[in-house]
């Protein structure tokens, strides 16, 4: 399978929406694989998520030429390719900064390990938490961040600190080598171009959900 239509890797970054849908296709492929299937179609990949066949084909075509008309996609092969595209064909060590209620919940979340993400270090400023062990990982002070990142060779971080501390802590993480931040603080972060940030604000997601449900209760069908 080629990684692009002309046989060369596509160097253009994929839009966020495309990457999000490719993650969904990968989960569907893995589900079909567990069912013992060996081939699938664009219809099977998109239907559980309400994604049309043409959109599935267009999303996959961004990364390469996959499948054949009348034959479909070979599930095992496409899983390997999509895992490589998404970067989940290898282990990713993570650091967690901020061990409040949310931080502790993330430590218990098994979905990270199933996708080869592993929390290898925890940092906090609370003296009562420093030195304690959670899920086999000992909490370290924030001023040990540089040493911890170097020791674990990690470039990804989970940021779970209060809003008023988020930018300061993000600046510190970036200064010591972090290049990707999953931001759970309810505030946008200003970062340099080489750093990627994905914000996770659960209240915004709930507001989005409430908006859609309210529309359906009022007899209006909202798209998306």
Image: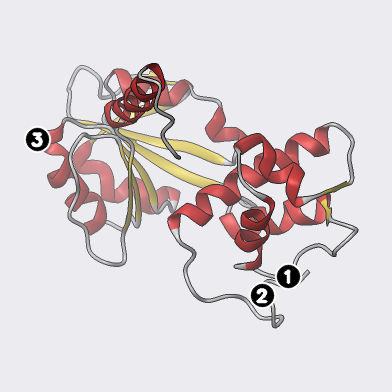
| Cβ–Cβ under 8 Å for marks 2 and 3 | no
Q: Nearer the viewer, residue 221 or 118?
A: 221
Query: Where's residue 74, x and y in %?
Result: 85, 54
Check disc 1 and report the residue beneath it.
65
Q: Earlier in the sequence, mark 1 or mark 2?
A: 2
Judged left or right of residue 116, residue 147 is left
Q: Residue at x 41, y 34 (%)?
A: 222
Judged left or right of residue 104, residue 18 is right
Query: Where's residue 80, x and y in %?
Result: 74, 55
Give the quarter of the figure containing the C terminus. top left
Give the quarter of the figure containing the N terminus. bottom right
| Cβ–Cβ under 8 Å for marks 1 and 2 | yes
User: Marks 1/3: CA distance?
Assistant: 47 Å
User: Marks 2/3: CA distance?
Assistant: 44 Å
Q: Earlier in the sequence, mark 1 or mark 3?
A: 1
Nearer the observer: mark 1 or 3; the answer is 1
Indicate the secondary structure of the residue bearing disc 2: loop
Q: Total number of numbered labels? A: 3
Judged left or right of residue 223, residue 210 is left
Check disc 2 and report the residue beneath it.
4
Q: Residue at x 69, y 77 (%)?
A: 5
Vertical placement of 12 versus 181: above or below?
Answer: below
Q: Residue at x 60, y 68 (%)?
A: 62
Q: Residue at x 25, y 20 (%)?
A: 129
Check disc 3 and report the residue beneath it.
164
Query: Where's residue 195, x and y in %?
Result: 31, 60
């Amino acid at each position: 399978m080629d990684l692009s239509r002309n046989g060369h890797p596509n160097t253009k970054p994929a839009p966020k929406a495309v990457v999000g849908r490719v993650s969904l296709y990968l989960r569907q492929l893995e589900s079909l694989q567990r069912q013992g299937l060996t081939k699938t179609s664009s219809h099977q990949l998109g239907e559980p998520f309400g994604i049309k066949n043409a959109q599935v084909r267009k999303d996959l075509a961004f990364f390469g030429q996959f499948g054949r008309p009348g034959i479909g996609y070979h599930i095992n092969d496409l899983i390997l390719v999509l895992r490589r595209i998404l970067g989940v064909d290898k282990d990713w060590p993570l650091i967690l900064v901020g061990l409040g209620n949310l931080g502790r919940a993330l430590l218990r979340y098994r979905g990270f390990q199933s996708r080869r993400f592993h929390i290898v270090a925890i940092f906090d400023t609370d003296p009562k938490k420093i030195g304690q062990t959670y899920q086999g990982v000992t909490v370290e002070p924030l001023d040990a961040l540089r040493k911890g990142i170097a020791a674990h060779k990690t470039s990804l971080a989970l940021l779970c600190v209060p809003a008023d501390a988020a930018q300061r802590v993000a600046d510190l993480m970036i200064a010591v080598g972090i290049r990707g931040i999953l931001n759970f603080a309810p505030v946008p972060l200003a970062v340099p171009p080489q750093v990627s940030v994905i914000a996770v604000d659960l209240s915004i997601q709930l507001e989005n959900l409430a908006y859609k449900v309210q529309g359906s209760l009022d007899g209006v069908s909202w798209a998306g």
